[in-house]
Image (cartoon, helix red, strand yellow):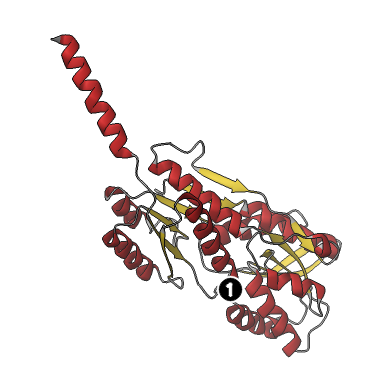
C-alpha cells in the first residue's frame, strides 16, 4: 500500500511539474516611447529572440509615453489577452509593483528591461552608474578638472537615476567642477532636450559642458546651443545610438556617448523569460551589461547596436 501511495504521489508531482512549463506563444512588451530608436531596437531584439523560440509567437509592443497610468492599463490588457510573458521598461521602479504582482498572480512572468522594477522576476539592464560615470569622466578629462557643467536630467526611472548618480559621483571627485543644474527633466526626447538646454543656456552664460541622460536629449541640446549661438560646449550622453554615431562624425558639439546594446539586452530578457516559463530560476535576478565610451576618436571602430540598420 505504501509503495502504491509513493508511486501515485510521484505521478502527481510529475504532472504538476509538467504543468508549470509553458510554451512561449504570446509576449506583451511595454516601453517608454516608440518614438525613441532605443526602444525600437529593444522591441526588435525581443521579437527576434522570441521567434527563435517559436516562429509563430505573437508579439504586442506598446509605448506608454512615460505615463504610469497608461502602463498599468497596458499590463491589464496583456493579462486579459493571456500573454505568456511580459517585458517592460517600467515608468516607476516602485509604483509599478502592484501591476507586476497582478500579472504574476495570473501566472505571467515579468522581466524588466533597461530599468529595474520592484517585484520583477528578473531585470536586464546596462550598468547605468558606470555609463554615467564614464560619460562624465570624459568631461572632467577634457576640462582638466575645472569648469561649470550641467547635468541634464530625465524621466525618473532607475536607469536615468543611476546615470545621474554615476555622473554626480564623478564630478564630485573634482572640486573645481561646478554643477550649475542637475534637476531639469529633458523628457528623454530630442524636443525635451532642446527646451531644457535653451532655458539653461539662457540662464547661464558660462557653461563648459553638458551631460545629457540619453542621445535624443544630447542631439536636442546641441541644436539649442547652435540656435543660441553658443560654441565650444562639450556634450556627452548615454546610448551609442545610430543617430549619435552620425553626430560624432558630423558638425556637432557632441563629443562622446556611453554605449548600450538594446537589441542584445532585449534578446537576453526574452531568453531569461522563457527559462522562467520552463521552471528555471535565473542565476541572477539582475543582469548588468557594461557600457563602453564612444568618442570622436574611436567612432569609426564602433560596431554600433546589434540591431539591423
Q: Position of residue 301 (x, y in %)?
A: 82, 60
Q: Where on the picture, by quarter, is residue 36?
A: bottom right
Residue nearest the observer in this picture, 215 or 7: 7
Instruction: Check the image and name the residue furthest to the left.
Output: 1
Q: Secondary structure at mark 1?
A: loop
**As displayed, is residue 108 above or below residue 71?**
above
Q: Indicate the position of residue 189 as horizontal and vertical percent values.
A: 58, 76
Look at the image and tell me whether residue 304 can be seen.
Answer: yes
Residue found 49% across the figure and 68% down from its top: 32
- The quarter of the picture where the C terminus appears is bottom right
Name the residue located 48 percent from the left edge and 51 percent from the top edge.
Answer: 270
Q: Nearer the viewer, residue 54 or 298?
A: 54
Residue at 82% x, 80% y: name it: 251
Left or right, 140 with respect to 1, comes to right
> Visible in this render: residue 209?
no
* Crowd around label 1: few <14 · some 14–19 · many ≥20 (10 Å): some
Work out which quarter of the rendered image holds the N terminus and state it.
top left
Q: Closest to the observer: 209 or 58?
A: 58
Residue 202 versus residue 37 in the image, above or below: below
**Which residue is farthest front?**
55
Q: Position of residue 193 (x, y in %)?
A: 62, 78
Q: Is residue 99 left or right of residue 302?
A: left
Residue that carries the numbered disc 1 in the rendered image: 184
Q: Is residue 175 above or below residue 7?
A: below
Residue 117 x/y as whole percent: 44, 53
Direction from residue 272 to residue 252 in the image, left or right: right
Question: Total marks drawn?
Answer: 1
Residue 164 sits in which quadrant? bottom right
- From the viewer's side, name the closer residue of 155 and 43: 43
Amino acid at each position: 500500500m505504501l509503495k502504491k501511495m509513493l508511486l501515485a504521489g510521484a505521478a502527481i508531482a510529475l504532472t504538476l511539474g509538467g504543468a508549470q512549463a509553458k510554451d512561449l506563444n504570446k509576449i506583451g512588451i511595454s516601453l517608454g516611447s516608440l518614438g525613441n530608436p532605443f526602444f525600437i531596437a529593444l522591441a526588435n531584439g525581443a521579437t527576434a529572440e522570441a521567434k527563435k523560440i517559436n516562429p509563430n509567437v505573437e508579439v504586442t509592443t506598446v509605448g506608454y509615453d512615460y505615463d504610469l497610468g497608461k502602463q498599468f492599463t497596458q499590463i491589464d490588457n496583456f493579462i486579459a489577452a493571456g500573454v505568456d510573458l511580459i517585458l517592460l521598461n517600467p515608468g516607476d521602479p516602485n509604483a509599478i509593483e502592484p501591476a507586476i504582482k497582478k500579472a504574476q498572480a495570473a501566472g505571467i512572468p515579468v522581466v524588466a528591461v533597461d530599468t529595474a522594477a520592484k517585484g520583477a522576476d528578473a531585470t536586464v539592464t546596462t550598468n547605468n552608474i558606470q555609463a554615467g560615470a564614464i560619460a562624465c569622466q570624459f568631461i572632467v578629462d577634457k576640462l582638466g578638472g575645472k569648469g561649470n557643467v550641467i547635468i541634464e536630467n530625465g524621466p525618473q526611472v532607475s536607469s536615468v537615476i543611476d546615470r545621474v548618480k554615476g555622473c554626480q559621483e564623478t564630478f564630485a571627485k573634482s572640486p573645481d567642477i561646478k554643477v550649475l543644474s542637475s534637476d531639469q527633466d529633458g523628457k528623454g526626447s530630442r524636443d525635451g532636450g532642446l527646451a531644457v538646454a535653451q532655458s539653461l543656456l539662457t540662464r547661464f552664460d558660462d557653461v563648459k559642458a553638458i551631460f545629457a541622460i540619453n542621445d535624443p536629449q544630447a542631439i536636442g541640446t546641441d541644436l539649442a546651443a547652435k540656435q543660441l549661438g553658443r560654441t565650444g560646449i562639450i556634450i556627452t550622453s548615454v546610448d551609442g545610438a545610430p543617430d549619435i554615431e552620425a553626430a560624432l562624425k558630423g558638425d556637432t558639439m557632441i563629443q562622446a556617448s556611453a554605449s548600450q546594446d538594446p537589441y542584445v539586452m532585449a534578446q537576453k530578457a526574452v531568453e531569461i523569460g522563457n527559462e522562467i516559463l520552463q521552471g528555471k530560476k535565473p542565476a541572477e535576478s539582475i543582469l548588468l551589461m557594461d557600457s563602453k565610451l564612444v568618442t570622436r576618436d574611436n567612432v569609426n571602430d564602433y560596431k554600433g547596436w546589434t540591431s539591423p540598420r
